[in-house]
Amino acid sequence: MRQKAVFWDMDGTLVDSEPLHHAALEAALRELNIEPPADLQERAVGLAAAPLYEMLRIEKGLSLPFEEWILHKYGHYMPMVADLMPRPGALEIYGDLGVRGIHQAVVSNSDRLVVDANLRAVGLSHPGMRSISRNDVLNPKPAAEPFLRAAYLVGVDPTEAAAVEDSWTGATAGLAAGMRTIFWPERPMEGPPGAIVVNSAEELRHQLGF
């Protein structure tokens, strides 16, 4: 199927930022004398900032107000951005889609500050670049709103677009938006019902029609 638009998740899909987010999260917690849960990385993948904060508040006694916590974590994350690398194969596919005239946008559950910093770090800040952050919507993933907003911005019907995601949270959002949803996890796993699972950049390229 040849879609008119492709909407990319950022963290873990376009860029290999999950290890940086995890390192920053652990460092931020330990600075507050909170021992991170052993399964923190697995549970945090794809999760928006607010539900992750609630989890840590309830389970680990995190007492900072939400906005203070966000700034505290980003104080650890932002110095690491210079080391950010794209996910192998992703930027090449992004570039090839652009040459073919396919509309694209980045749809993220991260804050605008992080989205912009990550895109600059891997050379994706350019005129006409469209991106959605958690600050741009009322209901972040797994709700459909971020992907529906992306479709509105590029002027396509959601059914004519594909969503590319590495997490269940994001893939659930793509499916809820009525998009052809391609689940490209960082390690092999089953995807949400209705999602197309790929396990390599080559498989992703094939599913996107070239």
Image (spheres, helix red, strand yellow):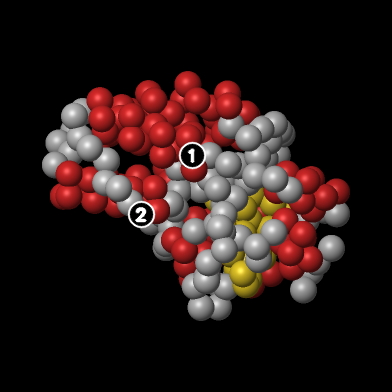
Q: Residue furthest front?
A: 38
Query: In the rendered picture of this protein, how many numbered marks are placed on residues?
Result: 2
Q: Nearer the viewer, residue 9 or 203?
A: 203
* Depth order, front residue of 90/126: 90
Q: Measuring from the top left, give residue 145's x and y in whole percent.
A: 46, 60
Which quarter of the rendering shows the C terminus? bottom right
Q: Quadrant of the N terminus?
A: bottom right
Q: Position of residue 187 (x, y in %)?
A: 56, 58
Residue at numbered disc 2:
43
Q: Position of residue 55 (x, y in %)?
A: 24, 51
Question: Residue drawn 70% across and 31% down?
Answer: 123
Rendered image: mark on residue 84: none
* Other residues around mark 1 within 10 Å, as few (<14) / some (14–19) / many (≥20): few
Q: The disc labelled 2 sits on which kind of residue? A: Arg
- Is residue 150 shown above or below 18? below
Element under disc 2: helix
User: Is any part of residue 111 visible from this angle?
Assistant: no
Q: Position of residue 205 (x, y in %)?
A: 77, 60
Residue 206 seen in render: yes
Q: Which mark is residue 19?
A: 1
Residue 117 quadrant: top right
Which residue shows up at 57% across the image and 54% down it? 186
Q: In the rendered structure, which disc, 2 or 1, sits on the residue that comes first in sequence?
A: 1
Q: State the CA–CA distance, disc 2 to disc 1.
A: 13 Å
Left or right, 5 with respect to 66, comes to right
Q: Residues within 10 Å of mark 2 (few under 14, many from 20)?
A: few
What residue is rendered at 33% in x and 51% in y? Answer: 39
Q: Quadrant of residue 143?
A: bottom left
Q: Amino acid at mark 1?
A: Pro
Residue that extends furthest to the bottom in the rendered view of this protein: 193
| Secondary structure under the numbered disc 1 in the rendered image | helix
Residue at position x 74%, y 68% in the image: 207
